[in-house]
Image (cartoon, rainbow, N blue to C red):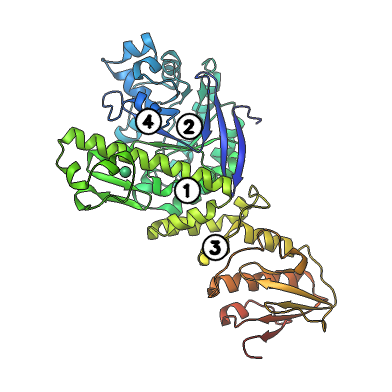
């Protein structure tokens, strides 16, 4: 389906900077964007300050809480959400699906809650989908997905004016169901695509499974659909999720963590009680020591921690956008992956989907930095290997990490992790990569796979590989027909 409310401006892997037009709010939201979750009953940081001090141009609140609230329901209907919350940006509303998942039932239909969201002035509304948890049996996942799909189709028929409507993508931990759900959602006339029910995966640090679930949903949705990773509020995993192609994040974490004395960083979560120093220069951390904040009253401590948590969260979104602009999002993801073994799992799972990411990865970016064995699984390496199967050197060909030789018809360069390439390409991206002198086995093995790819496509050509002390594991991947010379021993 052609989408006119989302435009992609810059791309790196499947990560992108985009513009989401929200007609009812009269604003365009630049993505990746963070939506702070605002609880009307408990405003840790006032929405007007989210806008003026933190730069939030979109937030999310729960319409089901308002619908059920004796304090707010009538006021919301009378003055509208923007005045109720004192916020001029775009407001997305959730429908009560979360409450459905937590408490097993809710007392509202999709039609009632969509109408209510429209009537209180929401800019992006949500039908009542079924958030199927991870690891349920397949039958349950299929049945609940069918119900969600019926509701999305019904939501298309509700007249909500120019309010955008979310089309949540469910399917539990079955990537093929997520893909089917994505395809179905994409075929509706709905507007924004939350990947739902991933919170349990993140709470259990199952970042590898999260990546597989998102990759499934993205295959179904196609490249130009705006994707919201629903309930993902920890900044440590934003870069990974953006590299997968997620555009919107919502954070309740900034306030919930603050309530428990927890301090967010891009490398994980710290307890305020354990900190002697703040590793941050936001206004809160620049003006207080951890001890000073511990000595504050409960409400003030919570507010200050929530403000730090918001600062670090918005900072990470800006860091990611700049990385996309510069073309080093993968270096950022790789850096973040080093903070926790579970994040490393997520990054390694991302490597399993490199061919999928390659389709939207720009042909040329800033310098490629090889930072670990995982760099060998990047989309640029996949693309180079694909390209090798279209190249046809003839006669006697030297593939060398050393100097060319006139005794051959052609001399090609070999650079790990890419493998062989004609010398004329040596100044083109990504073959200009910065690589360490002490290359690891994964890099050599990837180069050897490149050699194998070229040799398989050209069985008539006579290849010699001159390498600088490659590991046995790499040489084992080089086809037997290739003569090998170790340059470190001649
Ligand atoms: Zn701070």
Name the residue carrying label 4. 53
Vertical position of residue 260 compared to residue 148: above or below: below
Q: Earlier in the sequence, mark 3 or mark 1?
A: 1
Name the residue carrying label 2. 148
For the point 68% across and 73% down, which residue is it? 414
Name the residue carrying label 3. 375
Alpha carbon distance from label 1 to label 2: 29 Å
Q: Are marks 3 and 1 in contact (CB under 8 Å)?
A: no
Q: Residues within 10 Å of mark 1 (few under 14, many from 20)?
A: many
Of badges 2 and 4, nearer the viewer stands 4
Name the residue carrying label 1. 239
Q: Are marks 4 and 1 in contact (CB under 8 Å)?
A: no
Q: Secondary structure at mark 2?
A: helix
Residue 275 or residue 5, whichever sits in front: 275
**Which x, y percent locates residue 254?**
32, 38
Q: Earlier in the sequence, mark 1 or mark 2?
A: 2
- The answer to whether residue 233 is visible is no
Q: Secondary structure at mark 4?
A: loop
Alpha carbon distance from label 2 to label 4: 38 Å
Looking at the rendering, which quadrant does residue 338 occupy?
Answer: bottom left
Q: Residues within 10 Å of mark 2 (few under 14, many from 20)?
A: many
Q: Earlier in the sequence, mark 4 or mark 1?
A: 4
For the point 44% across and 22% down, which residue is it? 110
- The answer to whether residue 286 is visible is yes
Q: Earlier in the sequence, mark 2 or mark 4?
A: 4
Of badges 1 and 2, nearer the viewer stands 1
Vertical position of residue 54 compared to residue 272: above or below: above
Residue 341 or residue 150, whichever sits in front: 341
Of badges 4 and 3, nearer the viewer stands 4
Of badges 4 and 1, nearer the viewer stands 4
């Amino acid at each position: 389906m052609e989408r006119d409310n989302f435009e992609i401006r810059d791309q790196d892997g499947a990560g992108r900077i985009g513009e989401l037009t929200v007609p009812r709010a009269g604003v365009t939201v630049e993505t990746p964007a963070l939506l702070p979750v605002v609880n009307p009953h408990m405003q840790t940081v006032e929405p007007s300050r989210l806008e003026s001090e933190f730069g939030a141009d979109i937030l999310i609140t729960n319409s089901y809480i308002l619908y059920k609230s004796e304090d707010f329901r009538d006021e919301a209907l009378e003055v509208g959400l923007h005045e109720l919350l004192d916020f001029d940006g775009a407001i997305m509303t959730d429908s009560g699906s979360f409450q459905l998942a937590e408490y097993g039932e809710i007392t509202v239909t999709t039609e009632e809650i969509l109408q209510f969201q429209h009537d209180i002035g929401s800019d992006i509304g949500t039908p009542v989908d079924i958030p199927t948890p991870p690891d349920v049996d397949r039958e349950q996942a299929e049945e609940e997905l069918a119900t969600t799909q019926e509701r999305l189709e019904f939501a298309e028929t509700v007249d909500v004016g120019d309010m955008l409507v979310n089309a949540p993508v469910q399917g539990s931990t079955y990537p093929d169901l997520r893909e089917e759900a994505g395809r179905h959602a994409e075929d509706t006339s709905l507007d924004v695509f939350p990947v739902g029910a991933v919170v349990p995966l993140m709470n259990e640090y199952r970042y590898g499974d999260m990546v597989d679930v998102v990759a499934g949903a993205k295959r179904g949705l196609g490249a130009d659909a705006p994707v919201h990773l629903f309930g993902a509020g920890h900044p440590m995993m934003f870069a990974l999720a953006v590299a997968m192609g997620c555009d919107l994040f919502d954070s309740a974490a900034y306030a919930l963590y603050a309530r428990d004395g927890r301090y967010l960083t891009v490398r994980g979560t710290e307890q305020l009680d354990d900190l002697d120093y703040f590793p941050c220069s936001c206004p809160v951390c620049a003006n207080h020591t951890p001890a000073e904040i511990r000595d504050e009253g409960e409400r003030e401590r919570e507010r200050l921690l929530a403000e730090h948590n918001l600062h670090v969260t918005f900072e990470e979104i800006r860091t990611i956008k700049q990385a996309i602009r510069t073309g080093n999002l993968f270096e950022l993801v790789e850096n973040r992956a080093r903070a926790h073994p579970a994040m490393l799992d997520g990054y390694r799972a991302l490597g399993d989907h490199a061919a999928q990411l390659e389709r939207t990865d720009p042909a040329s970016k800033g310098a490629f930095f090889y930072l670990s064995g995982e760099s060998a699984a990047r989309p640029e390496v996949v693309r180079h290997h694909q390209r090798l199967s279209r190249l046809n050197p003839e006669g006697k060909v030297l593939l060398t990490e050393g100097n060319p030789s006139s005794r051959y018809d052609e001399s090609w360069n070999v650079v790990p992790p890419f493998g062989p390439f004609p010398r004329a390409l040596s100044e083109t991206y990504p073959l200009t990569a910065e690589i360490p002198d002490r290359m690891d086995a994964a890099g050599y093995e990837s180069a050897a796979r490149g050699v194998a790819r070229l040799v398989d496509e050209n069985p008539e050509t006579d290849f010699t590989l001159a390498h600088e002390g490659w590991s046995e594991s790499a040489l084992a991947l080089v086809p037997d027909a290739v003569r090998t010379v170790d340059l470190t021993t001649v």
